[in-house]
Amino acid sequence: MFKPLKPRRGTVHIKRDWCKGCGFCVQYCPVDVLALSKDYNAKGYHPPFPKNQQDCTDCRFCEIICPEFAIHVTTKVDEEEHA
């Protein structure tokens, strides 16, 4: 029998000190995973943080749209797939 497909999930990784606080990743995330932090990075900008990490669909749009290459996404692998 066929197994039903599970939705893909991702984990967002942010290089805080590379960010210039443009907010593109926050504004264009289709599932509202990111928000701008109130804290400053070393450059004096407000970097994003994953406020809803569990909602990431691994679309990688934040990674593609970031002009500073400050975000990358890794695909979560279910533990049961490796058992």
Image (tube, rainbow, N blue to C red):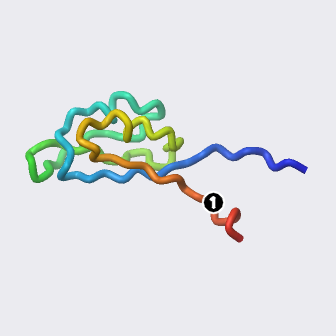
Q: Which residue is mark 1?
A: 78
Using the image as rendered, state which of residue 27 and residue 62 is in the foreground.
Answer: 62
Q: Position of residue 33 (x, y in %)?
A: 42, 40
Q: Position of residue 63 (x, y in %)?
A: 37, 41
Type of amino acid at the residue the image marks with label 1 = Asp
Q: Is residue 24 above or below residue 47?
A: above
Q: Is residue 28 above or below residue 68?
A: above
Q: Position of residue 32 (x, y in %)?
A: 42, 35
Compared across the picture, whether 53 is left or right of 17 comes to: right
Residue 61, located in which quarter of the rendered image?
A: top left
- Tag 1's secondary structure? loop
Residue displayed at 31% across by 51% down: 14
Query: The C terminus is located in which quarter?
Result: bottom right
Residue displayed at 46% across by 30% down: 30
Q: How many marks?
A: 1
Q: Is residue 39 above or below residue 27?
A: below
Residue 66, located in which quarter of the rendered image?
A: top left
Residue displayed at 53% across by 41% down: 57
Compared across the picture, whether 72 is left or right of 81 comes to: left
Count neighbours of disc 1 (C-alpha within 10 A) and say few if under 14, some if 14 to 19, many if 20 or more.
few
Residue displayed at 50% across by 38% down: 59
Compared across the picture, whether 47 is left or right of 75 comes to: left
